[in-house]
Image (cartoon, rainbow, N blue to C red):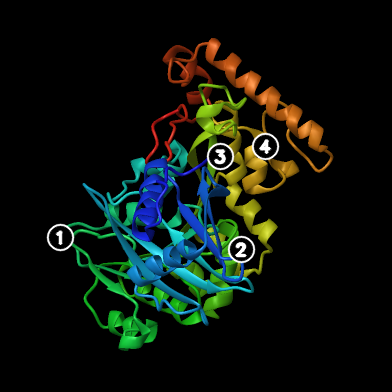
Amino acid sequence: MRMMIRDTRHATEWVNDLLNSAINMGVTDLQIRLDRDEKQLTVRARLNRVMEEVATASGDLSYEIVNRIKSHASISTGPAQAIADGLYVHETGYSTHDLRVALFPSVEGEALALRLPASQKMPTIDDVAFSELNRRLLDSLLGMPNGLLLMAGPMGAGKTTTMYAILGELGGTDKNVFTVEDPAERVVPGAVQIQINENARNGWPEVLRGLRRSDLEVLMIGEVRNGEQAQAALEIGNAGAKVVSSIHANDSIGAVHQLLELSKTSPRMVGNQLRGVVSQRLLRVLHKACAGAGCQECDDSGYKGVRPIHEVLVIDDVIVQAMVDGASASALRSVAQGQGMETLWQCALRLIDDGVTDHREAVRVLGLQPATERGPDIEGSPITTDNSPEELDHERTRNASAASAARSDGRDANGDAAPDVASARTIAAGHPPARLLPLPGSAPG
């Protein structure tokens, strides 16, 4: 993958070409590294969840490129001495894109991390492609009169996009909606958006104190990172508002334990104020044109686009009692599954069954498949710790062949199962046929 950058010595043109190309390709993150001694600049981009080198520059131009980005993001252009962040507003002929920029001093020089928003358009719940079961569970959470709803997952899992979609569902012109973000990533029509600014005495403590006294009905807190934020989210939700926030955790059960640890609140209190957790990951989608074998159009990766998978935990009386009893993560997960929760692996297995993705990708994102969640073996044996690298490659080939065969066995021109075959297999299991979510900015594969 290479960016379309003109042969120019002008930093402004170089940066504009880089950003235009990245946005058009659907890149989510850019990492720019400057080696000051060697006067060498390297750019890496994340596309389809994979990072690779896409551009280089050398000599004085390398300094000018970094300084152009820093100055446009209101970051000091001198040699990096401390971590800093800012907002880079990039304008094209027809739209404006707000890029989050973080600066890091390094041994060689400095590094810039740029986060590109997928779209300036407010996403909807339908855009996030929940399964039929998870959509029902989510709707039950959104219908609750008050309380906290958490989004869980690592960085880059699409949590913020889904939070905005949930906010759009909860809000409206007849609601008093607030957001607190650091920084705000997109404009939310009708909402009072507060951006944290510690230097202007508009930090988390001041904002959270003010929100406790406000007449809000819906609140989005960008992320719960510490005890103060955790306690505020729980208290504001308990006071009558609907609160949605995110937390770094591997899954829904991990999010519950993380919230307990941060808030220093009793399990019963947390259980009574936390309404549910939505955990999310993004899986790369097998490229239909080459059936996952790899081609020029997908940069020989075998994948094109991403599809979210979810795990929706509804906190009910049974879950609360397990929390009060001090259940371990594995025990609480078993209780949750008994209450109807579909795990991330179970969601991934359905997409593998539908030929949307493969075991190799699921293992890359979720780790080794638990023995308790093996499920039906549709496209080859599940990957375990006993698989050698050669077996992993063989499994990939088998998956590609199976996906190709699936299309010739009743799938339509888009690769989705035709209704007469669809659906007998997937709807009978309680799930609709999988719907692809293209990578933002890219055409469907």
Element under label 3? helix
* Disc 2/disc 3 C-alpha distance (Å): 24 Å
Q: Nearer the viewer, mark 4 or mark 1?
A: 4
Quarter of the rendering containing residue 257: bottom right
Answer few, some or many: residues within 10 Å of disc 2's Cα (few below 14, many 20 plus, some between 14 and 19).
some
Label 2 with label 3: CB-CB less than 8 Å: no
Nearest to N terminus: mark 1 or mark 2:
1
Residue at (50, 80) in percent of width and height? 227
Label 4 with label 1: CB-CB less than 8 Å: no
* Disc 4/disc 1 C-alpha distance (Å): 47 Å
* Disc 3/disc 1 C-alpha distance (Å): 35 Å
Quickly name the residue at label 1.
174
Nearest to N terminus: mark 4 or mark 3:
3
Q: Amino acid at mark 4?
A: Arg
Answer few, some or many: residues within 10 Å of disc 4's Cα (few below 14, many 20 plus, some between 14 and 19).
some
In percent of width and height, residue 400 lies at 63, 23
* Disc 4/disc 2 C-alpha distance (Å): 34 Å
As rendered, which of 273 and 411 lies closer to the eye? 411
Q: Which mark is residue 360?
A: 4
Vertical position of residue 418 compared to residue 235: above or below: above
Quarter of the rendering containing residue 393: top right
Residue at (51, 21) in percent of width and height? 289
As rendered, which of 243 and 412 lies closer to the eye? 412
Quickly name the residue at label 2.
322
